[in-house]
Amino acid sequence: MTPQVPHAGAMRLLDRVLSHDADSILCAAVSHRDPANPLRRDGMLPAVCGVEYALQAMAAHGALTGDGAAQAAGYLASLRGVSLRVARLDSIVADLRVEARALSRAARGFVYAFEVSAEGEALLSGQAAIIIPEAA
């Protein structure tokens, strides 16, 4: 089971939190193998979609280390150093392991390093900056 995240229905891509602490989270996912995955295009799930898995892990981490409420929806401000080591995720038989480590956290934004792997092999990695808008 995953904590509250600002995603619903089929867009909740993570299956469970394996571990977390004040600075990091490790999650598992199997939805990359689902033919009904909403991120699939032309029958495949491109590896770049792994970034969304990482973003959801970051949101889960925010909920777990905050007051338990869903992390406020934010905007992806930047991606840096993204490295794709595979072309697609749907052909990965093993569960995905999605790890995110906070590099900087503030009230209205954060920066995380992330890695998506399977069976000990890194599939993609990078760094993401998220901006949380002021409440309207």
Image (cartoon, rainbow, N blue to C red):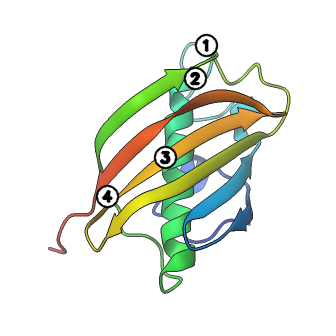
Q: Are marks 4 and 1 in contact (CB under 8 Å)?
A: no
Q: Is residue 54 above or below residue 102?
A: above
| The quadrant where residue 30 appears | top right
Disc 3 secondary structure class: strand
Q: Residue at x 20, y 64 (%)?
A: 133
Q: Are marks 2 and 4 in contact (CB under 8 Å)?
A: no
Tell which circle, 2 or 3, labels the residue nearer the N-terminal end: 2
Q: Are marks 2 and 1 in contact (CB under 8 Å)?
A: yes
Name the residue beneath numbered marker 1: 87
Q: Is residue 40 above or below residue 72?
A: above
- Residue 61 x/y as whole percent: 55, 66
Name the residue beneath numbered marker 3: 113
Name the residue beneath numbered marker 2: 47
Name the residue beneath numbered marker 4: 74
Task: Give the class, few, some or many, for how many residues have Cα within 10 Å of label 1's Cα (few <14, many ≥20).
Answer: some
Closer to the observer: label 3 or label 4?
A: 3
Q: Is residue 113 above or below residue 43?
A: below
